[in-house]
């Protein structure tokens, strides 16, 4: 029964990831904590996100060029290194308080603010800052996706281009964490059993979402990303509240 529940969790997570380009781990991890240890959850979530992101990158490979997300990817590396250092000297709860306040405020502001810009725009600076934040918060509190989603919202890219870009960025950023988990010996027999169930379930959920993409307008896509970002902020806030209870 546990494996059936696990498969359902990742099928749902794959569906959400297929529509928004992120959010798989945000959906799956809270449910996984009900019956799994964190030492098993983290490497599973990491490799599942990498695999699902690979599917997005392959599907939408013709929609974008690597150079448009290169600043975010490059800046994510020092962000991750600095984040690893910060984690040694600063309590994760401080980072979670900051992240929850920032994400929730950003979502509220975005829903209230009316953009006058109607086309696409690229910015190496904004991409670099968001990439740095992705690496920083990914290595400290495992929140890699939300900063990248904020960058995607800034650019105004169409859905297919945005999904492909998110896929490639998350492959390279979370893929490095997968390597570190492998070297640390987290890939156990139990881990492999769950992966053999989670991968096909997640991919099936993602493929179920693909036919819906053509019905999602640019405005709705923006709102979906904002909802996922807001959910991430609420999850962060919930962890903070749990810490003080």
Image: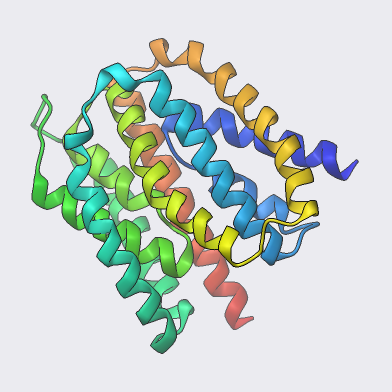
Residue at the spot x=80%, y=40% of the render?
5
Q: Is residue 14 left or right of residue 108?
A: right
Side of 242 relative to 168 (left or right) = right
Query: Residue 179 in the image: x percent, y percent?
Result: 51, 56
Q: Quadrant of the N terminus?
A: top right
Q: How many marks?
A: 0
- Say which of 189 and 5 sits in front: 189
Q: Can residue 3 be seen at all in this image of the molecule?
A: yes
- Residue at point 74% right, 46% down? 192
Q: Is residue 159 above or below residue 95?
A: above
* Quadrant of the rendered image containing residue 123: top left
Q: Residue furthest front?
A: 183
User: Residue at (84%, 41%) from the top-left corner?
Assistant: 3
Q: Quadrant of residue 169?
A: top left
Q: Give the quadrant of residue 119.
A: top left
User: Residue farthest to the bottom?
Assistant: 89
Quadrant where the image shows the C terminus? bottom right
Task: Decide if residue 114 is in sight here.
Answer: no
**Residue 217, relative to residue 39: is it above or below?**
above
Q: Position of residue 155 (x, y in %)?
A: 17, 35
**Front-most of residues 17 and 224:** 17
Q: Which of 188 and 213 lies nearest the eye of the viewer?
A: 188
163 on left or right of 205: left
Image location (x, y in percent) of residue 58? 41, 23
Q: Position of residue 94 (x, y in %)?
A: 41, 79
- The residue depicted at 60 percent of the width and 37 percent of the height is 13
């Amino acid at each position: 029964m546990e494996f059936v529940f696990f498969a359902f969790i990742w099928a749902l997570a794959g569906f959400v990831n297929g529509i928004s380009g992120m959010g798989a781990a945000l959906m799956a991890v809270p449910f996984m904590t009900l019956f799994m240890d964190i030492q098993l959850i983290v490497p599973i979530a990491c490799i599942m996100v990498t695999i699902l992101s690979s599917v997005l990158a392959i599907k939408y490979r013709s929609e974008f060029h690597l150079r448009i997300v290169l600043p975010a990817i490059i800046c994510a590396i020092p962000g991750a290194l600095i984040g690893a250092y910060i984690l040694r000297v600063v309590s994760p709860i401080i980072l979670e308080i900051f992240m929850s306040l920032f994400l929730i405020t950003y979502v509220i502001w975005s829903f209230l603010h009316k953009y006058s810009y109607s086309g696409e725009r690229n910015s190496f600076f904004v991409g670099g800052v968001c990439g740095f934040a992705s690496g920083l918060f990914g290595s400290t509190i495992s929140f890699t996706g939300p900063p990248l989603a904020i960058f995607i919202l800034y650019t105004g890219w169409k859905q297919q281009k945005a999904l492909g870009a998110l896929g490639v960025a998350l492959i390279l950023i979370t893929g490095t964490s997968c390597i570190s988990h492998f070297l640390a010996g987290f890939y156990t027999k139990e881990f492999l059993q769950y992966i053999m169930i989670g991968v096909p379930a997640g991919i099936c959920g993602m493929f179920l979402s693909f036919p819906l993409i053509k019905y999602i307008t640019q405005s709705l896509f923006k709102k979906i990303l904002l909802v996922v970002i807001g959910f991430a902020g609420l999850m962060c806030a919930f962890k903070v509240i749990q810490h003080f209870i």
